[in-house]
Image (cartoon, rainbow, N blue to C red):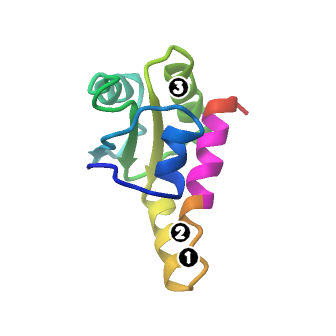
């Protein structure tokens, strides 16, 4: 997906966090089990400075979010890009918040990003 954001989360990725993100990579996995290192490596393998170093890994369910966040944090610390994992529950929450005119999408993404970058 091309990133032409002039404000908001995707704009701040580049301007504040200094994460190249001309393109946003989105990988969708329809697994019944948690995604693991091979799926993270597959997504981060698409990254480059000129294309972007940010991606969203979407999957049906994440049983152990803390472990997946830790794996994404390791990828980030190794300068292999930032990956934010989202499952069905995250997407439903964000869509419901828009429907209820609360629009928690940016806040939700920021919270996950902070957990991964700061590793907490």
Nearer to us in this view, 74 or 61: 74
Q: How far apart in space, not on screen, are marks 2 and 3 (Cα)? A: 23 Å
Query: Residue at label 3?
Result: 71
Q: Which residue is mark 2?
A: 93
Residue 97: assigned label: 1
Q: Earlier in the sequence, mark 2 or mark 3?
A: 3
Q: Determine the image quadrant of residue 35.
A: top left
- Name above or below for residue 83 compared with residue 106: above
Q: Which residues are magenta?
A: 107-116
Give the percent coordinates (x, y) of residue 3.
Answer: 34, 49
Residue plotted at (44% across, 26% down): 81
Residue 114 within the magenta-colored segment of the rendering: yes
Q: Earlier in the sequence, mark 1 or mark 3?
A: 3
Residue pictured at 63% horizontal, 59% vertical:
107
Note whether 74 is above or below 35 in the view shown: above
Q: Nearer the viewer, residue 46 or 21?
A: 21
């Amino acid at each position: 997906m091309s990133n032409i954001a002039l404000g908001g989360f995707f704009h701040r990725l580049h301007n504040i966090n200094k994460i190249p993100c001309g393109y946003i990579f989105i990988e969708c996995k329809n697994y019944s089990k948690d995604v693991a290192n091979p799926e993270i490596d597959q997504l981060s393998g698409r990254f480059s400075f000129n294309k972007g170093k940010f991606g969203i890994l979407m999957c049906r369910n994440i049983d152990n979010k803390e472990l997946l966040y830790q794996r994404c944090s390791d990828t980030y610390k190794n300068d292999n890009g930032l990956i934010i994992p989202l499952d069905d529950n995250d997407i439903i929450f964000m869509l419901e918040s828009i429907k209820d005119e609360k629009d928690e999408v940016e806040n939700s993404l920021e919270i996950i990003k902070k957990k991964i970058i700061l590793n907490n």
